[in-house]
Amino acid sequence: MPPPPRRVALTLILGSQLMMTLDTSIITTALPKVQQQFDFSPGALSWVQNAYVLAFGGLLLLGARTGDLLGRRRVFVGGIALFTLASLAAGLAPTGPFLIAARAVQGVAASLAVPSTLALLVSGSRDATDRARLIALYSAVIGAGGSVGIVIGGVFTDLLSWRWGLLVNVPIGLVITALAPRFLAGTARSEGSFDLGGALTSTLGMTALVYGFIQASEAGWGAASTVVSLAAGIVLLITFVLIERVVAQPITPLRLFANVERSGAYAGRLLIVGGNFAVFYFLSQYLQEVLGLSPLETGFAYVPVTGMFFAMVYVVRPLLARLGRPVLLVASLTIALAGTWWLSRISASSTYFPDVLLPLLVIGVGQGIAIILMTNGGVADVEPQDAGAASGLVNVAHQVGGSLGIAILTIVYAGALPNGKVAAFHDAFTGSVYFFVAALALGIVVAIVTRHRAPEITPQNPVLLEA
């Protein structure tokens, strides 16, 4: 039987990855319209984003394990089919709770499909050079997806309806589901077991924590729902650690955290993504509700910062050779902190240029470099048998960091809302500054501990390129 046509297979894999990457950001510019239609409170609105991101990030490692055990193509097709159905449900959602539930199912589906996309892509490479080229294409799709999603979301929201940003997944998903079994090479099943206990306790624990923070913004810190949720989250996460210590095949080998550089990279990524996600989340609302931009204009307002992030991919290597990893890490976090502080100075009289655009470009420089360095640090000195788990943890930290950032800063936003929306946005952006302060402090510690480590950025590292 002849091998599947590479171009069709490549299109299917990259198309599916783009679709699920878009879904993280495509709703961003639509949030004000969604809030108006369903009369969401600030806390409830955050779940439109968090339901997807938490389910996606929390189950990502289990999704990767599922693909290994059941066959990657089989799990990929199943994940895409479920994602398509959930997108249809979300786009047609009659109520706010229904929309949030559908978004959560989208996240579950993405956690099944995404881990298999890169594995299927790499398995079809001819040699190391071809593999690096394919990974570069894959990474470009991921990087472009965030910006393109915001723009497309703005187009649909402005010209049609926010619902089309979700419904557009349906025809794409149907085509991929129909063609994947024919054009993607199958993979054999493998022996092993599922760490369901670890997957459930980690996902439910993080969800309970985020829910507790959201409840704090709605009902106060002393409310029973807040206290119970936070306590349940802590207990579940402790249980997760205990399970991972004794289970035969853990989804998160605890030995990965024994390395200071890796642990610092995971925690640092969680902090800077938490601050940055919250900036984009609230900035979309600020641009429309205070500066009066349309959803379409808001979408295009994010393009320059994404371009700056991409530009950093080409300057990291020479800067690393000149400055060394510790200095470059601290410098990049300092730049990102400065840009975030600058953005927090916004007011009712601010304008997109220079008050928003210039700080965003500064953030793009600092965070673009820091994310690349932390991604590489997240897989530093990993044994081959732990490479998949380490790579997965990088993505988990990214998704969970975004959810926690939005949840925590929603408390800040809601607390300042009685003083007016501008004051609430100002305080939320100021809260993001503290995330970057914590990331910088952590970065300094990691830089001191790892100052003698030789710089190393390899184009063959798929996780690095995904950043």
Image: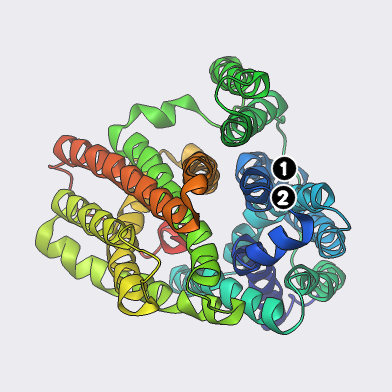
Q: Which mark is residue 112?
A: 2
Query: Residue at image x 45%, y 55%?
Result: 425
SS at mark 1 in the image: helix
Judge left or right: residue 169 versus residue 387: right
Query: Residue at image x 83%, y 74%?
Result: 179
Judge left or right: residue 206 versus residue 161: left
* Disc 2 to disc 1: CB gap under 8 Å: yes
Give the labeled residue for mark 1. Answer: 66
Please state which amino acid type lies under the numbered disc 2.
Leu
Distance, label 2 to label 1, CA atoms, is: 7 Å
SS at mark 2 in the image: helix
Say which of 103 and 282 sits in front: 282
**Can residue 302 be seen in this snapshot?**
yes
Say which of 325 and 133 sits in front: 325
- Seen in the picture, residue 452 relative to 140 is either above or below; the reply is above
Find residue 429 and report its horizontal and vertical position in percent: 39, 53
